[in-house]
Image (tube, rainbow, N blue to C red):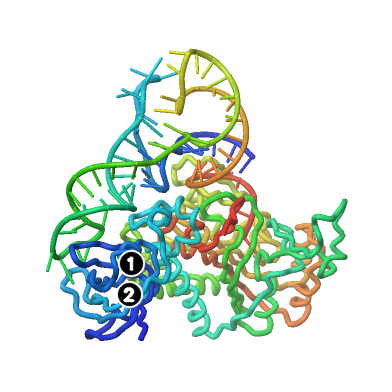
Amino acid sequence: MRLMVKELLLLDEPKKDVIIKGWIRTRRDSKGFSFLEINDGSCLSNVQAVLSWDKVSRQELSRLTTGASVAIFGDVVASPGKKQKWELQVEKLEILGDAPADKYPLQKKRHSDEFLRTIAHLRPRTNKYGAITRIRSELAFGIHKFFHQKGFCYIHTPILTGSDCEGAGETFTVTALDLSNIQGRIDFSKDFFKKRAYLTVSGQLEAEIMACALGSVYTFGPTFRAEKSDTPRHAAEFWMVEPEIAFADLNDVMELAEEMVKWLVNYVLEHCAEDLSLFVRFVDKNLTQRLELTLKEPFAKISYQEALEVLKKSGRKFEYPVEYGRDLQTEHERYLTEAHFQKPVFVYNYPKEIKAFYMRLNDDQKTVAAMDLLVPGVGELIGGSQREERLEILEKRMEECGLDKKDYWWYLDLRRFGTVVHSGFGLGFDRLMMYLTGVSNVRDVLSFYRCLGSMEF
RNA sequence: UCCCCGGUAGCUCAAUCGGCAGAGCGGGUGGCUGUUAACCACUAGGUUGGCGGUUCGAGUCCGUCCCGGGGAGCCA
């Protein structure tokens, strides 16, 4: 019977006649026998297989190199070694796939992240990238679990969209036209959808439709942005979690956001303890402390106006001026969350001029009910707002932003018929991964990253 | 797009003032009866990112392009 390495390591007693299939991580020879470290991806740990040389030919032994795939038949016995409880006594070994040592790029020692990006098809076989992948999986599952237990409806918003959303944010155009054979202007009315199509930059507008019918909903999927942002925190294809809630105001969604982040931190600490230990050891020594602080303390909450005061009083010299009407720069955000509060902080009520048209206008007529959650090391993790539910004001805001109301007729209909106060936010899933692991480049938490100028794998 | 740093063996890096191209790890060979970042000995391995220039002589200086990293901008 085939056992996963994870199952084998959790056995309570010895077990005869098991099969393990996996990849060799290292081989250590002694006289007459070898130790093989076998990993099958089920967990961070390897199982140590003890191979007596009379079980294989000399030629087979030489093929048991780092990266080779094998099937091992044998008995699980208590290990005399100190570093593991169980080991696998090999009865029979079958080599499934060779990995010639002079050609296979992965060594048993540590590699740089930069090098591993050049062999992204092999890096999941390393401890670190295996761990990242398993944590991603658990975290995604945790998100569904969180919303499911709170009674949210999981909705599927489209990836292909006809609305260029806010007219802000660079989009990717999708076309079925033969681009190699087009002269002059492109006539999108001849295209597949008879209009120009884009990859979605957010599921928010569709989520609002569903929230205004089903109450509490969330969407979780990939989003695409063609911004020429060449930084360790931006990818052209990334995953977003976007809850949208009817009858909820800005405070309600800030509460939800805090509850959710804390719940997920706790979930990962509980379910990914072994994998997380790798990041504590090798990636970010302060990880445990940061995550525990995240759980323990309430997040800070300040208005944009208050944030400006904090920055002005800081005595810091900032490269960019701190003044009303300007968006907070990266250096400002970092100061607030890393130096001043040293924990996650909500900044809310931004000037309407620097925010999107759909955000609800506050009574001061100057600010909108928007919020960002800034976290140490990552920056903006969440962006959200209370949506403008009043038809006349929404129309006025659209005009101010230079948008054509005709393009949004269905969005405006939500306010024409049975409008309700509603709010939501978007959480960058990959940035949450960075926060939870301490990995500092988004290219390393995405298995197949699409960034400005790179899409090899 | 701008600023800064880098590109030398499979990987991570050294190379003094412009003067013989080096180490560790990994690989190969041999050794070792319980290793676990195994250990010991020996050994092979180079278009110094590309192109052009200065010089008796360039890894090193100059120009240019490419690639990688960091910062900034851009960014729901």
Whole-percent x and y of residue A352? 67, 58
Q: Nearer the viewer, residue A360 or A451?
A: A451
In this view, the residue in front, A166 or A283, is A283
- Do callouts 2 and 1 point to residues on the same chain? yes
Badge 2 amino acid: Leu
Which residue appears at 74% of the width and 60% of the height? A173
Residue A427, given in percent of the width and then of the height, sits at 55, 67
Q: Quadrant of residue A160?
A: bottom right
On the question of residue A37 being in view, the answer is yes
Q: Nearer the viewer, residue A447 or A28?
A: A28
For the N terminus of chain A, the image quarter is: bottom left
Q: Which residue is mark 1?
A: A60
- Is residue A266 visible in the rendered structure shown here? no
Indicate the position of residue A418 as horizontal and vertical percent values: 74, 82
Q: Are marks 2 and 1 in contact (CB under 8 Å)?
A: yes
Q: Choose mark 2 or mark 1, whichever is in front.
A: 1
Question: Which quadrant of the structure image shows residue A291?
Answer: bottom left
Residue where numbered disc 2 is placed: A93
Q: Is residue A189 rendered to the left or right of residue A251?
A: right
Task: Locate the C terminus of chain A and report the quarter of the image it occupies.
Answer: bottom right
The chain to which mark 2 is attached is A
Gap in angstroms between the C-alphas marked 2 and 1: 9 Å
